[in-house]
Image: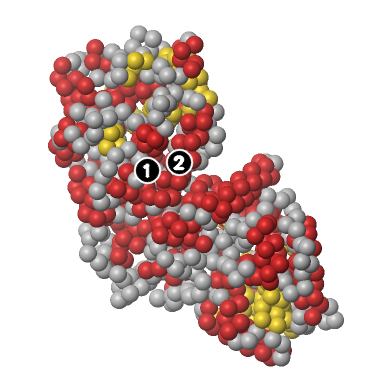
């Protein structure tokens, strides 16, 4: 089996940290939908960025070829992961850096804390990073008396507001500028009390606030967009220059990088530096791209570390139908085009990773049998907009469906049979085996009815009875049980008195098809006028 | 050409007039329509809800029913008036067959994947068949399609993104005599149906539907046309509910592409004894 050659343990450990929903998605979505301000901010922001992305993407005649290349490079990297990581470690070490391996969030946090302690510092500056959000590093350090200062403007807003990011690229997308001004006035010690909500003034205030931190900090913590195996080089892509400050000024630089971020060759950047900015911010070129390779004597940080983080990634890699979720370059295009995300915002997903990618990545990292993430794969109408937008062509809808299948199986104690016996965690006691739900019963019965034309035909004889359910206006507007979810905002037309199947049978009897051309063009199909069989209108 | 009609379960049971219209169109072009009696459903609702085991017999039934006719020479191609169901037949049937083998399901059949793919290859969505196989580019000239009035058009997600139908449905609608197709803002946005998504995540689904309904009503069109009865049932259900609270307006209808194309001068599409789009401003003018 391929998992052996990949060096994956039989049951890869699940991930922990901020990668779990806190409550079922429908419940969280219900609350967020009620927040009118949030919906307005989100609607505006996502539509603006959508249009921008479409414009710059359509400029490139070879966009589809670039997506194919990005997907191919990531597939190669994942299939050679153990080898590439070892190569990366050798190269990084040879150039004066130190490599640490972290199995999960707890281990990564401990390693980072230890490294900070060694410097004697109790303050760090941070470059926006998904990996450190994922492991909850800021909270972990704070509890232990180490202050971590976010330096990305939006992350700063979120941090000062004691809030959670709601978008991977625009963490404060749920705040408008008046709210931001209020946060600054409240939380920045020496801010100008006459601060207005003019974006430029807000940026200037943040700049003054951060400048002091940059100049005094001894330790910086970053994530990484890429790790180049052949050179041991790390890369961070950002647009404010705060990253460049963090990556060059402090004495010690600690980077936390998910193991899936490794790329085989420096040349591969050619592809990703075209895909990433256009997909994420809708820019043609990224403003600040920092690449560093170990230690350069007398220039930049002299104490350089990288923590390679698994936290469920090996587990995701072991799932052959889900592993391509690890190709994600965190551009956020999928959430910007997602009609569900647009309405619920990122907080509804609970995890650090919101939107369509979050709905697959979070359960893949924890295992879908982790109750808290089991509602995420259903947070999609499967419209497919995310797949079309994804620069590395992750087939998110297909993975969502795959995970729904895993969830149904985990929930109802289905025995996976011989082929499923070696599935990670499939037989563990953590599975929620429950009584059949309404959905189980409904779909079980539907399976019986819909797997035979005779049975469906027989049931359709009951259409006139169902017709009686409709009100005098010819509509069904209230149903019990599961159906209530439908009728909360939608009517159902009265069913027709006769199915097509039955109509066709009669028609064949009345005008049996003779041999030869056009014989079935009988009088029965004279016009499109609704006849007895067709009163059920779409209304 | 001999063409098998896959009516789809929702059209068979709820919208027989859509299948009747499909038959009319094809027969008008001189083709012979066959309705394989064993057919029932594509299994999409089960598949998309993660109930693969329950989907398997539904998929088996579809493959078995249609391949028999292909093999026996009873028809050359199959057509369904639904982008979503055709996408399921083309993409998901082989997938669930593979799943069953991988999982060692009791019902697993090693031959099913290839057989499902063969059926999928010969199955077409209506606009796809009309445009790519039967060469229909001008509905008025070739089908006699006539329907005075104004409509908006919603391109359903699966037809658009899984089948890559492009403008096939829209172009056919545009070539109907008397019909004005107005631009629908945010047309490419999902209506929020998504099968069991509509009940599992009813709040988000309803919020998506509300925007779709508002966009449709904003065009002033008398109807919204589309190629999927399921999405139209969802949108129509929202339009119907909306009108309950904004009484006084003429009801905005939903129409299936097949119904529009089947409408002719001699036998125009009617509802409740009147022309289908009688309330439409353009309809009055023509
Ligand atoms: S899944 Fe694709 S579109 Fe979404 S953030 Fe990742 S790379 Fe971007």
Q: Chain of mark 1?
A: A
Query: Which residue is at a point 22% across and 61% down the rendered structure image?
Result: A436
Query: Which residue is at a point 67% across and 90% down the rendered structure image?
Result: A117
User: Could you say whether the residue bearing mark 2 is in a helix, strand or loop?
Assistant: helix
Q: Chain of mark 2?
A: B
Query: Which residue is at a point 30% across and 63% down the rendered structure image?
Result: A409
Label 1 packing within 10 angstroms: few (<14), some (14-19), many (20+): many
The quadrant the N terminus of chain B occupies is: top left
CB under 8 Å between discs 2 and 1: yes
> Is residue B124 among the parts visible in the rendering?
no
Vertical order, B11 against A264 (above or below): above
Figure quadrant, ligand 1: bottom right
Q: CA distance from mark 2 to mark 1?
A: 9 Å
Q: In this figure, what is the number of numbered marks?
A: 2
Q: Is residue A326 left or right of residue B278?
A: right
> Outermost residue, right direction?
A298
**The image quarter in which residue A102 lies:** bottom right
> Outermost residue, front direction?
A194
> Is residue A366 among the parts visible in the rendering?
yes
**The image quarter in which residue A88 lies:** bottom right
Q: Are marks 2 and 1 on the same chain?
A: no
Label 2 packing within 10 angstroms: few (<14), some (14-19), many (20+): some
Here the colouring is: secondary structure
Say the numbered circle drawn on residue A489: 1
Counting from the top left corner in percent of width and height, residue A516 is at: 25, 14
Vertical order, A269 against A259 (above or below): above
Say the numbered circle drawn on residue A201: none
Vertical order, A441 against B140 (above or below): below
Residue A10 vs residue B187, the one in the foreground:
B187
Counting from the top left corner in percent of width and height, residue A236 is at: 70, 66
Query: Which residue is at a point 71% across and 67% down the rendered structure image?
Result: A185
Q: Which residue is mark 2?
A: B210
């Amino acid at each position: 089996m391929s998992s052996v050659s990949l060096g994956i343990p039989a049951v890869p450990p699940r991930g922990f940290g901020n990668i779990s929903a806190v409550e079922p998605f429908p419940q969280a979505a219900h609350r967020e939908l009620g927040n009118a301000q949030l919906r307005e901010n989100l609607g505006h922001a996502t539509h603006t960025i959508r249009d921008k992305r479409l414009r710059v993407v359509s400029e490139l005649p070879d966009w589809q070829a670039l997506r194919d290349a990005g997907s191919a490079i990531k597939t190669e990297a994942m299939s050679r992961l153990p080898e590439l990581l070892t190569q990366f470690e050798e190269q990084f070490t040879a150039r004066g850096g130190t490599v640490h391996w972290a199995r999960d969030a707890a281990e990564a946090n401990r390693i980072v804390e230890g490294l900070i302690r060694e410097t004697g510092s109790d303050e760090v500056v941070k470059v926006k990073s998904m990996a450190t959000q994922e492991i909850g590093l800021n909270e972990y350090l704070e509890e232990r008396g180490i202050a971590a200062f976010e330096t990305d403007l939006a992350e700063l807003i979120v941090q000062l507001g004691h809030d959670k990011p709601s978008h991977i690229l625009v963490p404060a997308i749920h705040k408008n500028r008046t709210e931001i001004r209020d946060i600054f006035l409240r939380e920045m010690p020496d801010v100008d009390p006459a601060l207005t909500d003019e974006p430029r003034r807000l940026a200037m205030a943040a700049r003054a606030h951060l400048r002091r931190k940059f100049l005094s900090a001894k330790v910086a913590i970053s994530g990484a967009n890429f790790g180049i195996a052949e050179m041991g080089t790390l890369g961070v892509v950002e647009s404010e220059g705060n990253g460049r400050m963090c990556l060059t000024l402090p004495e010690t630089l600690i980077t936390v990088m998910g193991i899936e971020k490794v790329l085989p060759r420096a040349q591969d950047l050619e592809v990703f530096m075209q895909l990433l900015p256009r997909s994420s911010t809708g820019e043609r070129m990224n403003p600040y791209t920092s690449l560093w390779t170990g230690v350069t004597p007398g220039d930049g940080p002299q104490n350089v570390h990288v923590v390679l983080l698994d936290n469920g990634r090996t587990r995701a890699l072991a799932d052959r139908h889900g592993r391509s979720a690890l190709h994600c370059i965190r551009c956020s295009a999928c959430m910007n085009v997602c009609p569900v995300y647009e309405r619920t915002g990122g907080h509804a997903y609970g995890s650090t990773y919101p939107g369509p990618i979050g709905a697959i990545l979070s359960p893949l990292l924890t295992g879908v049998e982790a109750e808290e993430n089991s509602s995420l794969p259903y947070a999609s109408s499967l419209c497919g907009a995310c797949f079309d937008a994804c620069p590395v062509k992750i087939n998110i809808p297909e993975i969502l469906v795959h995970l729904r299948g895993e969830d149904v199986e985990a929930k109802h104690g289905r025995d996976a049979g011989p082929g499923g016996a070696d599935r990670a965690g499939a037989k563990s006691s953590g599975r929620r085996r429950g009584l059949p739900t309404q959905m189980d019963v409904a779909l079980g019965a539907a399976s019986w009815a819909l797997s035979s034309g005779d049975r469906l035909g027989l049931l359709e004889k009951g259409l006139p009875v169902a017709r009686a359910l409709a009100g005098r206006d010819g509509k069904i507007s209230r149903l019990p049980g599961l159906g209530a979810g439908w009728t909360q905002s939608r009517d159902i037309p009265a069913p027709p008195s006769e199915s097509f199947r039955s109509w066709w049978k009669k028609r064949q009897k009345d005008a049996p098809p003779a041999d030869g051309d056009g014989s079935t063009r009988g009088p029965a199909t004279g016009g499109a006028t609704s006849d007895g069989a067709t009163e059920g209108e779409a209304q | 050409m001999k063409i098998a009609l896959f009516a789809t379960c929702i059209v068979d049971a709820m919208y027989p007039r859509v299948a009747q219209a499909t038959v009319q169109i094809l027969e008008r072009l001189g083709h012979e329509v066959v309705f394989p009696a064993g057919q029932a459903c594509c299994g999409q609702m089960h598949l998309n809800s993660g109930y693969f085991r329950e989907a398997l017999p539904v998929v088996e039934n579809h493959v078995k029913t249609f391949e028999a006719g292909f093999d026996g020479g009873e028809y050359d191609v199959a057509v369904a008036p639904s982008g979503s169901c055709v996408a399921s037949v083309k993409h998901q049937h082989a997938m669930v067959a593979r799943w069953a083998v991988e999982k060692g399901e009791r019902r697993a059949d090693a031959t099913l994947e290839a057989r499902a793919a063969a059926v999928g290859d010969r199955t077409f969505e209506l606009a796809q068949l009309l445009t790519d196989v039967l060469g229909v580019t001008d509905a008025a000239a070739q089908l006699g399609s006539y329907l005075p009035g104004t409509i908006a058009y919603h391109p359903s997600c699966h037809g658009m993104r899984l089948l890559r139908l492009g403008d096939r449905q829209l172009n056919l609608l545009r070539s109907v005599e008397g019909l004005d197709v107005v631009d629908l803002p945010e047309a490419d946005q999902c209506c929020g149906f998504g099968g069991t998504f509509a009940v599992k995540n009813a709040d988000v689904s309803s919020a998506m539907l509300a925007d779709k309904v508002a966009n449709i009503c904003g065009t002033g069109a008398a109807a919204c046309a589309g190629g999927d009865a399921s999405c139209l049932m969802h949108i129509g259900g929202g339009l119907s509910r909306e009108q309950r609270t904004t009484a006084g307006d003429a009801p905005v209808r939903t129409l299936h592409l097949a119904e529009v194309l089947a409408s002719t001068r001699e036998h125009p599409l009617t509802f409740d004894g009147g022309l289908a789009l009688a309330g439409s401003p353009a309809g009055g003018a023509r």
